[in-house]
Image (cartoon, rainbow, N blue to C red):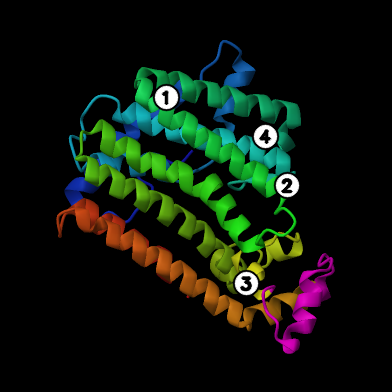
Amino acid sequence: MTSQASASLALPILDAGLEARLRQRLVEVEAELDATVQSEARFVTEAARHLMHAGGKRFRPLLVLLAAETGDPEADGIVTAACVVELTHLASLYHDDVMDEAALRRGADSANARWDNLVAILTGDFLFSKSSELTARLGADAVRIQAETFTRLVEGQILETLGPQDGADPLDHYLRVVAGKTGSLIATSARYGARFAGAPREVEEALTAYGEMIGSAFQLSDDILDVASDSDESGKTPGTDLREGVDTLPTLLAKRSTDPGDARLLELLGSDLSDDALHAEALGLLRKHPAMDEARAYVLERAAEARQLLTVLPEGSPVRAALDTFAEIVATRTA
């Protein structure tokens, strides 16, 4: 387990004082997370801690803590709210791995691979229940927000599983999936931090919108990197989604093409790419396709919109600088 005291933070914190405060609060978050997932049954505790200790970046709880800096960062409930969003995120990973039949998560065996699907599903349920227990401590409004967020998470997963309905735009459908599965919980992370710190309502609303937008943009930038990056750069096998037949932003944009010159690419994108030669051909054609620049432009636009929302914060404030820099990173990591 990587110590949060020594690991690099998931957000670019440029102010030394702010960084020190956030690191200290993350230590408190880690302690509460560890205590919360303890069960009377030792096996349940072990299974629940499996992914929690597998090296996650704690992006969502860090965003809670950072957003809380717009008000009173020491206010009651902030550390608990940070734990709520992280437990919700972790629970969703256990369920995702079962649905995706994943063997690895964060470089370690997934729970379903280490034990079985039943254990993974029940562990995810256990973590969701623990998240709900903590949310109840925060009051009825927090319960409502958490319930709405959970609804969006589940609906995002359902939409992804069922695919677009006949006649629906596949790209619009995919963007809804990303907003539900990724953007919603990041938006709630920012909302919780600002709300429980007593930040002004306009700040809370702006940071919530920022979280939704930048969270989705980050996932979409991952889509681009899955195609564009070499394995030496990213540490991942390029074109994984392509090989598995998973449509993402670049492939969905490419599939909109009516250019006769794209016939071979479109043929490949509609076929089984488990063969190495066919996969390499499709990846090469997609990397050179205008859809890649179109996808990058879309992410750049979302990041720019997210940065504009930050004008509600004082210019030069450490919180605004951190969030602005993060948006810039999201925009430029696809280059």
Q: Which mark is residue 230?
A: none
- Three-letter residue code for mark 3: Leu
Residue at image mark 3: 253
Q: Earlier in the sequence, mark 1 or mark 3?
A: 1
Q: Which mark is residue 143?
A: 1
Q: Secondary structure at mark 4?
A: helix
Whether residue 288 sits left or right of residue 76 in the image: it is right
- Three-letter residue code for mark 1: Val
- Three-letter residue code for mark 2: Leu
Residue at image mark 4: 111
Q: Earlier in the sequence, mark 1 or mark 2?
A: 1
Q: Secondary structure at mark 1?
A: helix
Percent across and percent down for residue 119 are 70, 26
- How far is mark 2 from mark 3, CA to CA? 20 Å
The residue that appears at 52% across and 34% down in the rendered structure is 150
Q: Nearer the viewer, mark 4 or mark 3?
A: 3
The residue that appears at 61% across and 48% down in the rendered structure is 107
| Magenta range | 255-278
- How far is mark 1 from mark 4, CA to CA? 28 Å
